[in-house]
Image (tube, grey):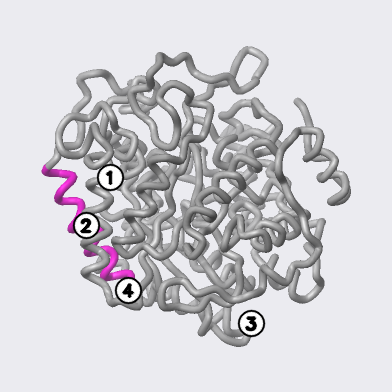
Amino acid sequence: MAKFFKYKSVTDLEAENARLGIDLRFSDDLSPLFRPITVGTRSVGNRWCVHPMEGCDGERDGAPGELTFRRYARFGAGGAKLIWGEACAVNMGARANPRQIVLNESTRAAFARIVDDCRTAHRDANGTDSDLLFGLQLTHSGRYSHPRPIIATHDPLLDPRTVVDKSTGAKVTPDYPLITDDELKRLVDDYVTAAKLAVDVGFDFIDVKQCHRYLLNELLGARNRPGPYGGPYENRTRLAREVIQAVRAAVPSNVVIATRMNVYDGIPFHKSANDDGTPDAHALPLANGWGMSETDPFTVDLTEPLRWIGEMRSLGVALVNATMGNPYAQPHYGRPFEYPPPDGYETPEHPLVGVNRHFRAAETIQKAFPDLALVGTGYSYLQEFLPQAAAANVRDGRVSIVGVGRATLAQPDWVRQLLDAGKLDRKRVCRTFSYCTALMRAKQHPMGQFPTGCPPFDKDAYGDIWKEAQQLNVKKPS
């Protein structure tokens, strides 16, 4: 297994950047990260965002669990002024796992507690929460729904990977039914109901999730779906457009409408005989996909994503979080890693190339829409040098806000560390070991899903959970 991250200083990273011919930038002046930014009608106190980090620790009825409350209190205390709440299913059939949270009338009190705990912790640690923006991500898991896939289109690359029956391993076949046009139309009401409840319990923004090949993202690339929700661009964006319009009309004007959106899907990779990531065999032109050429699926093509962002802005979307890939099919695109997840492959590219892909795509979007509040992705791999890269990107107008995902599980107080000490605690920096992903993939728990967190650096909460998972033969990341 190749080990890539051997860097002891920014100088080392700059030399590697030059060797690879990529465009990573670094700055020791972190002040751009602590300047406020206007998002919609709201002022956000700094340029740090906690990405939507799902804990898979809800109850069977969709209510948050004790680990959920703990996580958001820690996020609140940590100092980031934008907290992007995790994936919350718009109905019970839209969940990606049996412990994904669901906001409805029976769970609303628990969600209100999340908001209250998070804001209280933020005030206690940071003095004020008047410039804190805390939102909720509304999702439909589509082909990754539990207990049965709900697919928007037949995808020749993803269908053979999509499990219909976990007991037999049966996969989606060509005659597997698609979600109907009428069923898609009815989902708009589910999004509106969840959005109104989210506002009622105190969330400041609503994210209409369009990423990672879940339902709305799958529709964005569904060129081979017949009818009003597939084929040409106008049809593929139709459901997301209807949802955004309906949500915007249903909530007060001071509530920010946001989206976390794939800007590049990519094609699936599999583990080769020597464990390397290898692209699946594919025919050109591709039947489906978003943010990439039909004839060159390895190259980011932002033509349609830029068009859609422009249209979403006219619909009232004020906050965009740019991401990539499919965590089930090509995790190295979405989250460049040093150690693969246990069900994954060795990275087929230098992880810094993947970081650069994120940064360049975000820069293209930000330059096209200079006044857009844009959250960037791909920073955790940079480990203790994450702040310097973030500062340079904000300084240079390559992105407005820096989102941090896996690293928040390892040390949710990273912003406070920078404020108090000017640097991160190297002993607690996420090393992209993929333990969190290993737990997320572990289904042998009595509730059908192990909760996920950071066993190496959050042993108090996840040490025993990891030991239990290992006893059930959950493979340790290699």
Is 194 part of what is drawn in magenta? yes
The type of residue carrying mark 1 is: Thr
What's the residue at 56%, 43% (across, down)? 439
Where residue 199 is drawn, which disc sits there?
4
Q: Going from the N terminus, do you reach mark 1 or mark 4 first?
A: 4
Tell me if 10 is positioned left or right of 78 in this view.
right
Q: Main secondary structure of the magenta part?
A: helix
The type of residue carrying mark 3 is: Asn
What's the residue at 36%, 62% (across, down)? 317
Helix or strand or loop: what does disc 2 sit on?
A: helix
Q: Residue furthest bottom?
A: 127
The type of residue carrying mark 4 is: Val
Where residue 126 is drawn, which disc sits there?
3
Task: Quickly name the residue at label 1.
Answer: 237
What's the residue at 57%, 62% (across, down)? 400
Between label 2 and label 1, give the one nearer the viewer: 1
Between label 1 and label 3, give the one nearer the viewer: 1
Asked whether the beta carbons under mark 2 and mark 1 sit within 8 Å of each other, the answer is no
